[in-house]
Image: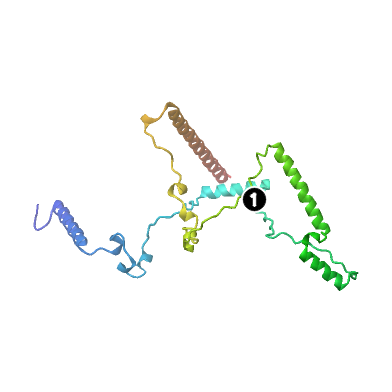
Amino acid sequence: MRENGRLSTHEKHLQKLQSEIEQMEKANLEPKTWTMQGEVTAASRPKNSALEVDLDFEHNMRPAPVITEEVTATLEDMIKNRIIEGRFDDIHKAPSLTSKAPRERKELDENKSKKGLADVYEEEYVQKTNPAAAPLSFSNEQKKEASVLFKKLCLKLDALSHFHFAPKPVIEDMSIQANVPALAMEEIAPMAVSDAAMLAPEEVFSGKGDIKEEAELTQAERKRRRANKKRKFKAESVKRMGNKQQENTTENHDDGKEES
């Protein structure tokens, strides 16, 4: 009711609602900002405008854990225990393996040769024309003897196993290579992509298993769920009682200091 040109409380409330509705309608009719237009390209928004907005985007890697006081205390306890026990997981340097076999060192004879130049040329000519007639060195004779002994040993071992483990003879077969470009023979995955970006979602985040209703659970599953709930509740109650006792001890200690 209006009395002497004054508005009642109800009329003031209606007037306020009407002004808010008009402002909302006006805001809906105005052009929206680029952040409210869905997918936006760089050409349809101002330059460097994305730096001023908090954007949400998906990561292929597992997010970093939140560092809290409990996590810090757990890490400190683990470090202290390892220092006390002397358990250090130091990385040992792997031994470097030579890619090539060591060359055979030949002993040099510093004495004056007793052969003439004609004898040396004669031996070289005989080796070229008839390699079988050339005299073998001491090392070559040992290698030949070792290879003969090894072949005899392999033959006896194959006979004991009825030639079951003997390798099959190598048969040369003709292979046809397709005339394809070099890029088709390479891997499809680019070399610059990390292994984390190529993981599937189920490999990054492990699921909680099959979710079943209460009616679908068997008797063993119900007992297991009930036991897990009891175990979790018991652990929380023990932790709560420990925190409460610690607070009471701290308060008693503070009261003793004030009395002294």
24 lies above or below 78: below
| Whole-percent x, y for residue 69 in the image | 51, 49
Q: Nearer the viewer, residue 144 or 238?
A: 144
Residue 208: quarter of image: top left
Q: Nearer the viewer, residue 179 or 63?
A: 179
Q: Nearer the viewer, residue 185 or 17?
A: 185
Disc 1, SS? loop
| Whole-percent x, y for residue 193 in the image | 48, 59
> Residue 193, can we see it?
no
Q: Please name the residue that numbered disc 1 is placed on.
A: 89
85 lies above or below 7: above
Could you tell me which residue is drawn at 72 percent across and 44 percent down?
A: 154
Q: Residue most toward the bottom? A: 117
Describe residue 128's horizontal placement relative to residue 167 as left or right. Answer: right
150 lies above or below 111: above
Q: How is the image coloured?
A: rainbow
Describe residue 129's horizontal placement relative to residue 38 as left or right. Answer: right
> Residue 26, can we see it?
yes
Could you tell me which residue is drawn at 84 percent across and 64 percent down?
A: 107
**Type of residue at label 1?**
Asp
Of the 4 image quadrants, the one containing the C terminus is top right
| Whole-percent x, y for residue 178 in the image | 48, 59
- The number of numbered discs placed on residues in the rendered structure image is 1
Mark 1, other Cα within 10 Å: few <14 / some 14–19 / many ≥20: few
Q: Residue most toward the top? A: 219
Q: Residue most toward the front? A: 129
| Whole-percent x, y for residue 229 in the image | 45, 33
Describe residue 120's horizontal placement relative to residue 176 as left or right. Answer: right
